Image (cartoon, rainbow, N blue to C red):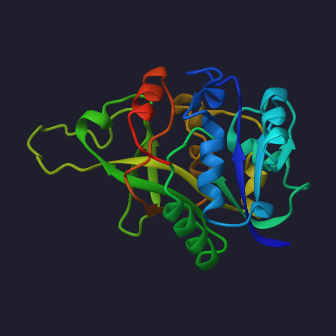
């Protein structure tokens, strides 16, 4: 059994921006840019695209990329990983979202290194953001305690500066790199409810089940492709 593998869940028909993963920037699909960043971290034998899309599997075949075909109607990337855990055996599953084409390879490596140290703890990345970015509903904001354990995550503005007097309020967003110990994947059973259903943030499923999630500080260079405007933003960045 491998110590870790990198899994890149790729759902073609996302709710907020359908077919975003196969939009081309610099003559390459978004999810292949993400894959290339993972290749800077480890050998391709440890990297797998997970998808139910025939279009994405054809692109993988054309580019000699490892993939696993999953069932349809899987509701989150984490559930997609859970669905293949008996096909791909590993102690830890590193989850990199397919819509993060400028993800920093050093950040992926940092999560992997932490996963070797905290072998039975779920890990997730975070970085500091400004108030303008924190107000975007598409961005999950993060609150954690002094031990960097996740307290809550929300698409609303948290923490809320109720008195308007705290000028030093800091805001953090989730960076979508996870490390899931194999035993934690049992909680991802393709059923969304409670806080996760309200916020549409899958890591909240673990919080509701009293599973510790340790937050790891990562760089602030990456952003996910959530909206059509993000494609135009990406085109203006030199990232290859």
Measured from the top left, where is residue 210 in percent x and y? Answer: 60, 56
Evaluate whether residue 155 shows in this view. no
Evaluate whether residue 31 shows in this view. yes
Closer to the camera, 159 or 170? Answer: 170
Q: Residue at x 42, y 65 (%)?
A: 148
Closer to the camera, 36 or 88? Answer: 36
- View extreme (right): residue: 87
Measured from the top left, where is residue 123 in percent x and y? Answer: 56, 62
- View extreme (front): residue: 27
> How many dots with numbers?
0
Classify 57 as above or below 46. above
Q: Residue at x 52, y 68 (%)?
A: 110
Q: Where is the N terminus found, in terms of image quarters?
A: bottom right
Classify 223 as above or below 177. above
Measured from the top left, where is residue 94 in percent x and y? Answer: 66, 59
Classify 187 as above or below 122. above
Image position of 132 (left or right of 212): left
Measured from the top left, where is residue 155 in percent x and y? Answer: 43, 33
Quadrant position of residue 44: bottom right
Closer to the camera, 150 or 42? Answer: 42
Image position of 219 (left or right of 203): left
Quadrant position of residue 144: bottom left
- View extreme (left): residue: 165
Q: Residue at x 54, y 35 (%)?
A: 26
């Amino acid at each position: 059994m491998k110590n870790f593998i990198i899994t890149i869940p790729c759902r073609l028909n996302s709710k907020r921006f359908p077919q975003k993963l196969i939009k081309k920037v610099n003559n390459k699909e978004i999810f292949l840019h993400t894959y290339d960043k993972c290749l800077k971290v480890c050998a391709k034998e440890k990297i797998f695209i997970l998808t139910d899309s025939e279009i994405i599997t054809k692109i993988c075949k054309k580019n000699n990329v490892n993939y696993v075909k999953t069932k349809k109607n899987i509701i989150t990337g984490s559930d997609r990983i859970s669905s293949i855990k008996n096909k791909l055996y590993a102690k830890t599953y590193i989850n990199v979202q397919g819509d993060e084409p400028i993800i920093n390879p050093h950040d992926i490596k940092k999560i992997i290194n932490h996963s070797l140290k905290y072998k039975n703890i779920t890990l997730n990345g975070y970085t500091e953001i400004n108030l303008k970015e924190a107000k975007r509903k598409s961005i999950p904001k993060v609150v954690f305690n002094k031990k960097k354990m996740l307290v809550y995550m929300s698409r609303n503005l948290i923490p809320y500066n109720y008195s308007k007097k705290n000028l030093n309020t800091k805001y953090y967003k989730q960076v979508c790199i996870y490390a899931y110990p194999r035993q934690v994947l049992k909680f991802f059973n393709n059923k969304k409810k409670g806080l996760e259903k309200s916020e549409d943030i899958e890591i909240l499923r673990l919080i509701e089940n009293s599973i510790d999630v340790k937050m790891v500080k990562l760089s602030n260079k990456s952003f996910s492709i959530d909206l059509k405007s993000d494609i135009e933003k990406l085109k203006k960045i030199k990232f290859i």
